[in-house]
Image: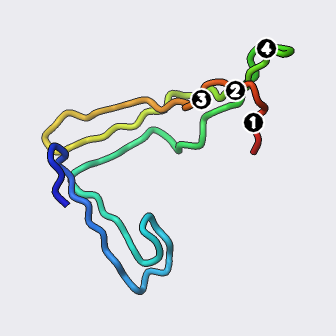
Amino acid sequence: MPVAGIPIQLIRTYDTRALWASDFGVGWSLDIRNVRVRDNGEMGLSWQGAVIGSGLNRQYCLQATKKHVVTVSYPMEPSTSSSRHSAQPASLYIPSL
């Protein structure tokens, strides 16, 4: 699937013997070529809940316990890195699990 400006190849393959579910469902697999994505840890780890304020002014939020970084490398181009953070830094409501 050629895409202008992004030098990657996405290859989708179906195998009737593959009985596990993946991004496209049972039997399908996805291979990404010419691009490398690395992160410095598992996405759901290294976060902690915190309470800021008190009384009616109390807010609940997630705080990173370490820096979360994703690095994307393309062939013959410099790597691009970005940090991950909580999409909603604070809420007036108690988070539920």
Q: Amino acid at mark 2?
A: Ser
Q: Which residue is mark 2?
A: 91
Q: Are marks 2 and 1 in contact (CB under 8 Å)?
A: yes
Q: Position of residue 93 (x, y in %)?
A: 76, 30
Q: Quadrant of residue 78?
A: top left
Label 4 vs label 1: CA separation? 16 Å
Coordinates of residue 55 in the picture (x, y in percent)? 86, 15
* Position of 4 relative to 25 (above/below): above
Q: Which residue is mark 1?
A: 95
In the orientation shown, which residue stands out farthest toward the right? 55
* Crowd rating for badge 4 (residues with CA inside 10 Å; few <14, some 14–19, many 20+): few
Above or below 14: residue 7: above
Which residue is rendered at x = 19% and y = 46% of the image? 6
Give the residue drawn at x 38%, y 30%.
Answer: 82
Disc 3 marks which amino acid?
Gln
Tell me which label, 4 or 2, sits earlier in the chain.
4
| Horizontal side of residue 20 vs 56, given as left or right | left
| Proximity of marks 3 and 2: CB atoms separated by less than 8 Å | yes
Amino acid carrying mark 1 in the image: Pro
Q: Quadrant of residue 50?
A: top right
Of the 4 image quadrants, the one containing the N terminus is bottom left
Element type where label 3 sits in the image? loop
Q: Which mark is residue 88?
A: 3
- Compared across the picture, whether 72 is left or right of 3 comes to right
Closest to the observer, 45 or 24: 24
Badge 3 or badge 4: first in the primary sequence = 4
Circles 4 and 2, Cβ within 8 Å, touching? The answer is no
